[in-house]
Structure formats: C-alpha cells, structure tokens
C-alpha cells in the first residue's frame, strides 16, 4: 500500500479544526458510558448535533467580538479582551478572546501516518502520537473531504494510539484524507493531505484466502456462527458508543464474516464477553477467534469459553491480531459465552468469531 503525500489545503485544516473541537466536546465531556437500558443517539447523529452546536457557538462568538469592537471604536477606546461575568437576565456564557493554538501534527507523531487494512469498502488509519490527543479523520473524493471518521478507541478521552476506521467506501477509488487532533493544552493539530486507493470489488482479504489443497468452504466445515446459519448474539458486555448489536461497533459485527467490521466493547478490557446462541445443540469441534487491536491497547491475548451447562474450556492464547486463530475443541453446546481472560486493556473486542461442528445426536 502506497500513501501519497500532498500539500495540505486550507480547507482541510479548517475542516479538521472543527472536527476535533467538536469531537472533544462530545467525547471528552466526562459523561459516563451509556447504561444498557438507555436509548442513545447514533454516532452520525451525535456528530451532526455536536458540529452544529460548535458552529453556532463560533458564530455567536464572532458576532459578540464584532459588536464589542464596533462599540469600542465608536467611543474612541480600545476594547478589552477580558470577559466580564454575566449579570441577571444576560446570557450565561459571554465569549472572550480566542486563546487556542494551531499546531503541526507532524511535530507530535512518532511515525508516519499509515492507511492499512484496505479493502473494497473500508480502510483503517493508524497513527501514534507522543502526547494524548483526541483525534478524527476527514476523508472524501477531493480535498473538500465531506466525511468524518472518529477514533473507535477514545473511551471518552484522548490517547496516543489512534485507529479511525473509514467505511462506506467505493471499490477501486482514490480517496483523500487528513488527520487532526486536539491536545490537552487546547492546541489543534492539523496535517497534510494523504491519498490511497481502495481495492477492486472482487478483492479477497489475505486472511480469507483458502489454505493450499483445502476446499474453499474451509477444511473444518461450515462456520455455524453466522446469522444465515441461525446463530445470533444473545448477550454482550457492551458495545462501543451504543446499546445496539447492529451499531457501528456492535457485537453482530463479530458474526458477519466481514473482516472490515468489528465488535468493540466500551472500555471493558479483561471484563469483555460475548454470548452466542447457535441454531441447535451442536457437537463443537473447533473455534476461531480474531481479536481487534489498537496497537498497544484493545487486544485480547487469551480467552475462555463457558457453555450453557456451565462447562469451561481454555484459556486459549492468541499470538497476534493479524487473522483468525483456530483451536480444536470437543464439547456439546447450543449457547457459548466467550470471555476475555488476559488483554491489553481498553475497548477490547473481536473482528470475527467462528464456530465449527455438527448437530449433536
């Protein structure tokens, strides 16, 4: 994969500045993760509302500053930049001077930004910063961008390992992106324009290429942990940013057979778990597990399985997060609870979970 560096456009810097400020307001406001029984707005709706609020605040501040400047000039005085406390009946917030700073993201990058895991319809952006930053990516067909991808592992705060996932892409198409963030001191960091090309529509990820001399259906048989096989997610420790199994990082992503989607918990770390109900009682002969990762966090290092009858198996060690790891087992169950045992913490989860076997006699 080649990433082509291009000159940053002024539009890109403005877009990223608004994105990261709005994201900081939404993601770093200190609110607790949503309760399981609360109805939460979807991520796109939250982004739009937050951006609208940020835009309104900017316009209000501009009008306030212009008004103050005009009155000062008429009186022959230099307007003061210091805000005064509102009196009764006045707005609760009075805009003061702008004190934010603009920085170059390159100054806090440990390595060059990479676009990885490119498929026909998605791509992941990877970056590591020397300080904690709340980040976002603006992307689109031109340097006007037009779409936003937030870091999936923020957990309500900034951090140094970043991995926004770009989805809804068109096959064999060149995309532009720019990466930005806001630091704890209020500095808004912008970056140059980058480009990448998505894979053709018939692209098959390497992890899904059949082993030599092995039938395409997989030597282990058919994966029974699929919706079209009657399987479903019956429970989960949490879904990142939503209570819905079908959300952007909902648990159903672990059973869809698509390596460009994934289930992410809401910061569950070692406490992450997912329950799968098969179509019928099954003599399970093999398990497959592909852990998600954010580099130094969000990776499951080992897991165990507990059946509906209470039998426990494992732990099963996962050497890396590059593909599905398979384990031969021998037990009978219809309901399986897969629990993280050892992790690197954070928003742990799974790219794919596979179950193989045959109907129990």
Image (tube, rainbow, N blue to C red):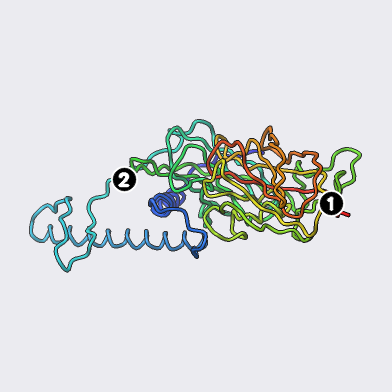
Q: Which quarter shows the C terminus?
A: bottom right
Name of the residue lying farthest toward the right: 213
Residue 13 on image: x %, y %: 43, 48
In screen coordinates, is 192 left or right of 315?
left
Residue 25 on image: x %, y %: 38, 53
Look at the numbered disc 1 and give the secondary structure of its residue.
loop
Disc 1 marks which residue?
A: 222
Residue drawn at the location 59% of the way across and 59% of the way down: 247
In screen coordinates, is 236 left or right of 143?
right
Disc 2 marks which residue?
A: 100
Q: Which quarter shows the N terminus?
A: top right
Residue drawn at the location 75% of the way across and 48% of the way down: 354
Gap between marks 1 and 2, in whole Å?
Answer: 56 Å
- Above or below, 3 against 280 in this view is above
Residue 213 on image: x %, y %: 91, 39
Please tell me which residue lies in front, 244 or 177. 244
In screen coordinates, is 336 left or right of 220?
left
Residue drawn at the location 72% of the way across and 45% of the way down: 311
Please tell me which residue lies in front, 275 or 141. 275
Residue drawn at the location 76% of the way across and 55% of the way down: 334
């Amino acid at each position: 994969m080649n990433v082509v560096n291009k000159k940053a456009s002024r539009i890109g810097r403005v877009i990223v500045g608004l994105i990261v400020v709005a994201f900081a307001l939404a993601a770093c406001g200190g609110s607790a993760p949503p309760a399981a029984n609360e109805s939460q707005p979807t991520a796109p709706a939250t982004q739009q509302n937050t951006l609208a609020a940020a835009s309104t605040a900017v316009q209000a501040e501009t009008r306030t500053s212009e008004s103050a400047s005009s009155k000062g000039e008429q009186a022959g005085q230099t307007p003061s930049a210091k805000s005064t406390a509102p009196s009764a009946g006045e707005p609760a917030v009075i805009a003061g001077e702008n004190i934010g700073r603009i920085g170059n993201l390159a100054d806090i990058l440990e390595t060059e930004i990479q676009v990885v895991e490119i498929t026909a319809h998605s791509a992941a952006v990877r970056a590591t910063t020397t300080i904690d930053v709340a980040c976002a990516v603006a992307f689109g067909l031109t340097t006007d961008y037009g779409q936003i991808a937030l870091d999936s592992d923020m957990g309500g705060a900034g951090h140094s390992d970043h991995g926004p996932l770009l989805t809804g892409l068109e096959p064999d198409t060149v995309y532009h992106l720019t990466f930005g963030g806001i630091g704890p001191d209020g500095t808004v960091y912008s970056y140059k324009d980058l480009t990448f090309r998505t894979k053709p529509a018939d692209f098959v990820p390497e992890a899904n290429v059949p082993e030599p001399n092995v039938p395409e259906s997989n030597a282990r048989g058919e994966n029974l942990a699929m919706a079209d096989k009657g399987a479903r997610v019956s429970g989960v420790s949490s879904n990142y940013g939503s209570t819905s199994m079908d959300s952007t990082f909902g648990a159903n992503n672990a059973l869809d057979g698509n390596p460009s989607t994934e289930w992410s918990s809401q910061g569950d770390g070692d406490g992450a778990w997912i329950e799968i109900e098969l179509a019928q009682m099954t003599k399970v002969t093999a398990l497959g597990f592909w852990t998600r990762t954010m580099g130094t966090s969000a990776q499951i290092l080992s897991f165990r399985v507990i059946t509906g009858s209470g039998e426990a198996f494992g732990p099963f060690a996962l050497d890396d997060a590059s593909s599905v790891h398979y384990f031969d087992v021998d037990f009978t169950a219809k309901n399986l609870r897969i629990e993280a045992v050892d992790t690197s913490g954070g928003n742990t989860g799974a790219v794919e979970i596979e179950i193989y076997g045959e109907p129990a006699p």
